[in-house]
Image (cartoon, rainbow, N blue to C red):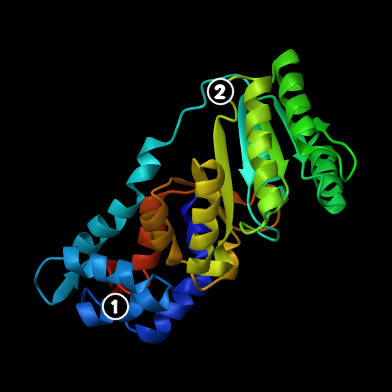
């Protein structure tokens, strides 16, 4: 797993090397500030990190690791998948990789031996329905779908009812990529949430927001808007392998106080890796802290 996470940080690590070309056993706080800003950590979070470091001007790896790890404490409180079917609503703006992530999640659950069903509730965009159908065929997973323009709430309802009748473990419902300033689409997603609860009380059990890693900290405002509209339970970061803004995860976690479940590291069905805060932080710290093996 670590190789996948570290590989996804290649562009971020290369950016860090432009301001920290030499690895050191200890670095100054000024050097640390330059490194963090280069990795797209917001200045507010950089100041917070430096504030909690020991008073010494030199920074040691173990102290920095402890502080950085504290940003991901929400990952220790991820909800367990108790209800059956466990209904997840997948949200996010157009272009974030939402539909592909639905397929990747379904693939993970299937490999765990679970029975999965998909709901193509992104009826706003015909291509989204066809894209999810192709993934369903490829992964041999059942799907509930309708034509473009049909009521997405009806798709969500039918998906959940089918999952209940056929005793599926997981139901994954894709939704239209919507911008937070589009009131009609915001109302639509609120309706989907209400209808899910009517189909199966208490669902959706988890509302997962997909954020495009290449947007870095600019994705935070999107996330805040979704959180205000319907509430968000967890985040998945996509396209982390295609950006030098890997440090934005600290800012995202700091602002939203939500667990990061997975990171996307490619386009294939297996290119979704469970987020491990320790391995993510170590991957960054290895780029500018010298280890004994570095001679």
Q: In this figure, which residue is indicated by the disc labeled 2? A: 202
> For the point 48% across and 62% down, which residue is it?
6
* Percent position of residue 275, x then y: 47, 49
Residue 105 higher or lower than 5, as above or below: above
Picture quarter with the C terminus: bottom left
Q: Residue at x 49, y 71 (%)?
A: 245
Mark count? 2
Which residue is under mark 1?
Answer: 33
* Residue 169 visible from this viewpoint: no
Along the line of sight, the residue nearer the viewer: 131 or 5: 131
Image quadrant assignment for residue 39: bottom left
Q: Gap in Å between the C-alphas at discs 2 and 1?
A: 45 Å
Residue 46 falls in image quadrant: bottom left
Q: Nearer the viewer, residue 182 or 192?
A: 182
- Give the x, y percent position of residue 102: 68, 43
Q: Position of residue 56 (x, y in %)?
A: 9, 73
Residue 207 visible in image: yes
Furthest toward the left, the residue is: 55
Disc 1 packing (10 Å; few <14; some 14–19; many ≥20): some
Q: Secondary structure at mark 1?
A: helix
Which badge, 2 or 1, comes first in the chain's sequence? 1
| Nearest to viewer (mark 2 / mark 1) | 2
Q: Residue at x 45, y 31 (%)?
A: 79
Element under disc 2: loop
Q: Residue at x 51, y 73 (%)?
A: 244
Q: Which mark is residue 126?
A: none
């Amino acid at each position: 797993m670590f190789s996948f996470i570290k590989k996804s940080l290649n562009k971020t690590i290369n950016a860090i090397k432009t301001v920290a070309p030499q690895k050191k056993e200890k670095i100054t706080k000024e050097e640390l500030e330059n490194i963090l800003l280069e990795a797209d950590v917001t200045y507010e979070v950089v100041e917070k990190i430096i504030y909690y470091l020991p008073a010494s001007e030199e920074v040691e790896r173990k102290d920095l690791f402890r502080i950085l790890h504290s940003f991901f404490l929400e990952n220790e409180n991820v909800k367990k998948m108790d209800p059956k079917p466990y209904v997840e609503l997948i949200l996010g703006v157009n272009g974030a990789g939402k539909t592909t992530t639905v397929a990747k999640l379904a693939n993970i659950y299937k490999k765990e031996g679970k029975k999965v069903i998909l709901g193509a509730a992104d009826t706003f965009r015909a291509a989204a329905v066809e894209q999810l159908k192709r993934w369903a065929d490829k992964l041999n997973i059942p799907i509930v779908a309708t034509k473009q323009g049909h009521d997405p709430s009806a798709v969500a309802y039918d998906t959940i009812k089918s999952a209940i009748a056929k005793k599926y473990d997981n139901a994954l419902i894709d939704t239209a990529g919507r911008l937070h300033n589009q009131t009609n689409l915001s109302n639509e997603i609120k309706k989907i949430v209400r209808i899910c609860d009517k189909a199966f009380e208490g669902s959706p059990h988890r509302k997962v927001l997909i954020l495009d890693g290449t947007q870095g900290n600019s994705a935070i405002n999107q996330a805040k808007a979704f959180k205000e509209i319907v509430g968000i339970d967890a985040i998945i970061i996509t396209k982390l392998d295609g950006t030098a803004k890997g440090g934005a995860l600290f800012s995202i976690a700091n602002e939203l106080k939500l667990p990061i479940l997975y990171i996307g590291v490619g386009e294939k069905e297996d290119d979704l890796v469970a987020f491990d805060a320790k391995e993510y932080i170590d991957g960054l710290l290895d780029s500018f802290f010298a280890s004994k093996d570095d001679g």
